[in-house]
Amino acid sequence: MKAEKQDIILGEAFILNPEVQNRLLLIPVYKTTEMIFAEDKTPQKYPISTDDFNITSQYYDFIGDKIALTKYDCEAKILQKAKDSFQEKDKYYDFSEKTSLFEPELILGRIFDYLGVKSREFDKFKDLEDEIVHFKKIRFSHSKNQDKILENIEKVKNYYKRASKEQEIDAEFDKTKDTKKFKQSYQQLELDFVKEIDYDGLKIKYIQNHYYLPVILSETEKIEYINHIINVKSEVDFINELEQYLDKSNNIFKQFDWWMFSKLDQTLDEVFIPYYNAKGNNIANFKPDFIFWLQKGNRYQIVFIDPKGTEYTDAYRKIDGYSRIFESGDIKQSKDFSYNGYTVNTLLLLKPKRGIAEVPENYRKYWFDNFDDLARKITIP
């Protein structure tokens, strides 16, 4: 009886881009502090409607300190900070929230909880090691032709060897002048080293500057026989637009000494930006869809890009989390960090679903409409 095929993990079929060996790929590392939001000079703001803020601050005035301490069993420093926050409302509250609960007793408890959240702050940059691993976990269904997809991956991932192989064929021809063998060699070259293959609803691509090779995209978002690939439409569109942009002779990436990028998986990879998640009242991890590394001289830039068109209010909280760690001053200027002789700074860019016009002015610099707009926002050192 013939043994039934099992699903296979394709991870070993992928390779790290050979360029990675010569490149410094940095990611940020964070640490949880003992400091709570009540002690933080610049905490992320608590989202609340104007109506809810007004009735909650009035409710607090009504019950007073003693009843609040007894009823909510909170620390004295949190109670004091809550009182201060009602006086400095623009520092502690985000009034973009449109929905009102009109439940001051509940909201006051949530504000106390918010002020008790432990903060997370930037610790250092480190070399990328095993923080991007999703390509090692790609599972392919037994119901499909496993041998064929492995063959196609092999052809595409080795595309970087094509140029040297061409030189070998040309050198051999210069010696032998064997036209027949020369033609046969080039025909075989076309079969063995392929830049892109369409296979069963997938596009298997060689993208020169991507962290691992090859890159697999799906033509449809709902795909069950393979996982941990690029299948979300906004991400697929981003890759296609990036490739079109790179064809331009004056593309921004040519102004750097080198650059690379990688897809980030929301479940498996550990490259993220901490932010205050009001729904869970905790510090959550924002994982952008892509990370770019760019270097020119001793200037080094990390760009986080999320093209999925995140819901605006959620995106603003993620931006606030990013800004609190990586920016300074009222104009939100990117901080410069030092790492082994390099000056490192960062950039966060998101793509709105309905265009930048709907984005408030103070958040507009974080959004891009197209690649020309993205290029204008990437700083040339």
Image: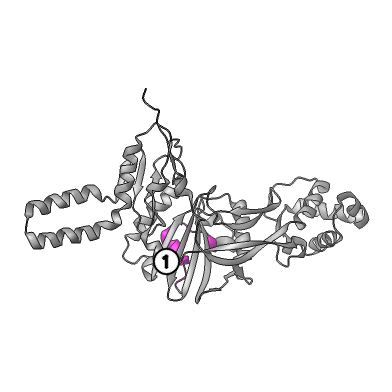
| Residue drawn at x 46%, y 37% as measured from the top left | 222
User: In the rendered image, which quarter is residue 169 located in?
Assistant: bottom left
Q: Position of residue 183 (x, y in %)?
A: 12, 51
Residue on which disc 1 sits: 23
| Residue drawn at x 54%, y 57% as measured from the top left | 271
* Segment colored magenta: 365-380
Mark count: 1
Between 29 and 357, the residue placed more toward the observer is 29
Between 218 and 339, the residue placed more toward the observer is 339
What residue occupies the far front of the structure in this picture?
1
Q: Is 285 placed left or right of 376 in the picture?
A: right
Q: Is 116 placed left or right of 158 in the picture?
A: right
Instruction: Relative to 197, say whether 365 is above or below.
Output: below
Where is the N terminus found, in terms of image quarters? Answer: top left
Between 294 and 191, the residue placed more toward the observer is 191
Q: Amino acid at mark 1?
A: Arg
Instruction: Relative to 101, say whether 24 is above or below.
Output: below
Q: Position of residue 70 (x, y in %)?
A: 91, 51
